[in-house]
Amino acid sequence: MNIIVDAMGGDHAPREIVDGAIQAVKEFDVNITFTGVESKIRAELAKYEYPQDKIDIVHTDEIVDMHDPATTSIRKKKNSSISLGINLLKESAKYNAFVSAGNTGAVVCAATYYLGMLPGVERPAIGLVIPTLKKFSFLIDVGANTDPKPEHLLQSAIMAKVYAQEVMGINDPRIGLLNIGAEESKGTDFVKDAHKLFLERLSNFAGNVEANEIFAGRCDCIICDGYVGNVVIKISESLMESALALIRREVKKSPLSMLGAMLMRGCMRDIKKHADYTEYGGAPLLGVNGLVMISHGRSNAKAIKNAIRATIHEIENNVIDHIIKEVG
């Protein structure tokens, strides 16, 4: 198994990317091929002891910055670490998947352009495993397709069902459509059309899911367009960070509060771990003809290691073959 890793993608590249990949090589049965500036990658590799036969580098000087337009990866920087990695995945059976914490739009654009779409899928979608009060749910789309048609949401729902079954191990996952109310009459014409389509085509459709139910775990898969999904995850991330900051600030106000916090330290640590995005690593880009995992731009080594772990699960469970079968 050989996974291509964009060594130059992310706020802390290549330091955290290389560190996380080395951890993955040591813990999992996987080979890593880095794409990026070889001298910088080797400088990071020199800090570690690792099985050198499991690490390879394909050099390129071009890097897509986080603030570059999405189309940069296919127009101005066709030899970037992103485009190079995705083309390696396309052109050689030697490679199984591509992982990047770089510019999300550029990864989506390059993957769609170079890999093409799976039969029966018209648009890509980014899914994300999210913690809930029950266990985990799969939220899709969180940023790939911001102006979809109802048919595209149906395709996302089918892909989410496959991912939840094959990777998350959820038997017959329940699917919910994110909306402003539970009633069929609620929402925009677009959402109402999608609701009708879901009723006709999905046997496990559980109806509309309101925003305040996302983390309750009522549905295993929650479907929305990429614009709404991206807003949801960013608000959720900000709320968690703000809540933790508020707790720290209030705890410091009295000795009694500090004592209580010490007594609850283990409990708070478990809660933080359950909500920590680094535990889940990345978000699969579904619908393209190749396995692509997108990690958070702020990913540390732990997040990269876990993104590789999640990618391995996709490979082992033949996610693409299952999607083709279900969509077709």
Image (tube, rainbow, N blue to C red):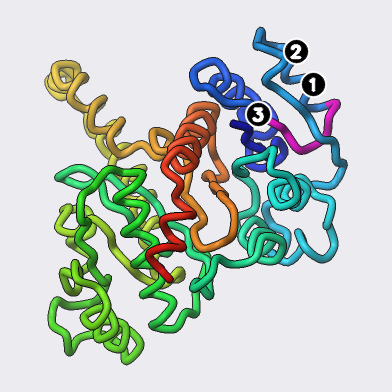
| Residue 288 on image: x %, y % | 57, 61
Identify the secondary structure beneath mark 2.
Answer: loop
Kindly identify which residue carries mark 3: 32
Q: Amino acid at mark 1?
A: Arg
Quadrant (top left/top right/bottom left/bottom right) for the C terminus: bottom left
| Residue 228 on image: x %, y % | 39, 70
Q: Residues within 10 Å of mark 3 (few under 14, many from 20)?
A: many
For the residues labelled 1 and 3, the Cα–Cα distance comes to: 14 Å
Quadrant (top left/top right/bottom left/bottom right) for the N terminus: top right
Kindly identify which residue carries mark 1: 42
At x 54% / y 33%, what residue is drawn? 304
> CB under 8 Å between callouts 1 and 2?
yes
Q: Amino acid at mark 2?
A: Ala
Q: Amino acid at mark 3?
A: Ile
Q: Residues within 10 Å of mark 1 (few under 14, many from 20)?
A: few
At x 17% / y 53%, what residue is drawn? 217
Q: Which residues are magenta?
A: 32-39
Identify the secondary structure beneath mark 3.
Answer: strand
Quadrant hosting residue 41: top right
Kindly identify which residue carries mark 2: 46
